[in-house]
Image: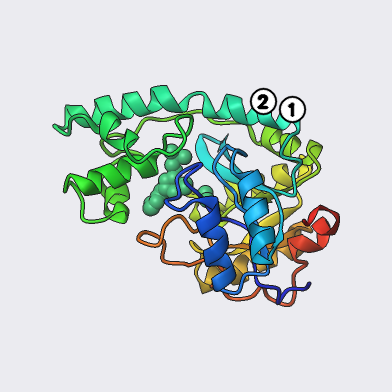
Amino acid sequence: MNTLTNADLHCHSVVSDGTLTPEALAQRARDNGVELWALTDHDELGGQGRAMAAAQAAGMRYLTGVEISVTFLGITVHIVGLGVDHTQPALLAGLQATRNGREQRARDMSDDLARVGIKGVYEGALKYVGNPELISRSHFARYLVEIGVSKDTNDVFRKYITEGKPGFVPHRWARLADAVRWITEAGGVAVIAHPGRYKLTPNEEFALFTEFKAHGGQAVEVMTGAHNASDYVKYAGYCQEFGLAASRGSDFHSPEESHTDLGKLPDLPGSVTPVWDLLQARIH
Ligand code: AMP
Ligand code: MN
Ligand code: MN
Ligand code: MN
């Protein structure tokens, strides 16, 4: 395996906020030519056994995965963990604690939407939830589309449930140091997910990469659905500057909602070390 390997190391199933089962995702990944796959549900490892079995049945190599929600300098940052022991108690406890606030946050989001006249959104969003511990803004977005408040989920995120908009409720997720430690102590590699999405100043972004590295983080997503061509160049450069390996993952959630399909990103640039080079012993 090398930088040209068709690896897709970031996507979501019904175990978090995706719309496909782990089995359907594995089939779709295989059909799209993926050779090395990881399911990375938000704050949750419950789909790993199914994903691993489905990957093996489809003839793909597999890395365990998770995407941990972190609060850094007051904003939400996502840290992907690859190759973790998905039965490790400290990691499971950390993820459990990270999931715990979601229920109350969802009720508060619903109350805030009711203030602008949109009622019953908590109950409506629950119809889309596959895992009762993982109600997310994506489920709210799907229900708001269903009732005609927005034409699609992207429009929901432009008008509602984001900072400064109706239905947004600030939330404190895990600390960066804890998320990186849970991942590395479970034998995995921590990866900064989709850095191009964060609204950080250059100084804040430098602090994120510096602190992440100091805590033991080892990689960054260079190729990901939310990045454009200039992000690819920028974050491949950060790999050199910070001594990080590079990851590649679509962040696929749903055939209807995701513009980047599984396995369809450009290859990693030849200048970087692929994150799977660090994980040879963890590949199933
Ligand atoms: P939560 O973890 O509940 O805050 O939900 C975050 C999820 O909402 C992300 O993982 C995405 O799946 C989705 N999301 C957040 N922002 C956007 C956006 N601007 N457009 C589309 N989906 C988004
Ligand atoms: Mn998501
Ligand atoms: Mn994310
Ligand atoms: Mn994701």
Q: Residue lying farthest left?
A: 117
Residue at image point 62% right, 70% down? 34
Residue located beneath label 2 in the image: 93
Residue sitting at 42 percent across and 51 percent down? Answer: 19
Is there CB contact under 8 Å for labels 1 and 2?
Answer: yes
SS of the residue at dot 2? helix
**Left or right: where 179 falls relative to 194:** right
- Residue depicted at 64% across the width and 75% down the height: 267
Q: Is residue 98 above or below residue 227?
A: above
Image quadrant containing the N terminus? bottom right
Q: Amino acid at mark 1?
A: Pro
The residue wearing badge 1 is 89
**Residue 140 picture location, percent across and down:** 32, 40
The quadrant where residue 56 appears: bottom right
Residue 125 vs residue 137, the one in the foreground: 125
Visible in this render: residue 156?
Answer: yes
Q: Which secondary structure, mark 1? A: helix
Image x and y of residue 284, in percent: 77, 56
The residue sitting at 21% across, 56% down in the picture is 151
* Residue 162 in view, yes or no: no
The answer to whether residue 62 is above or below residue 137 is below
Is residue 194 toward the left or the right of residue 93 in the image?
Answer: left
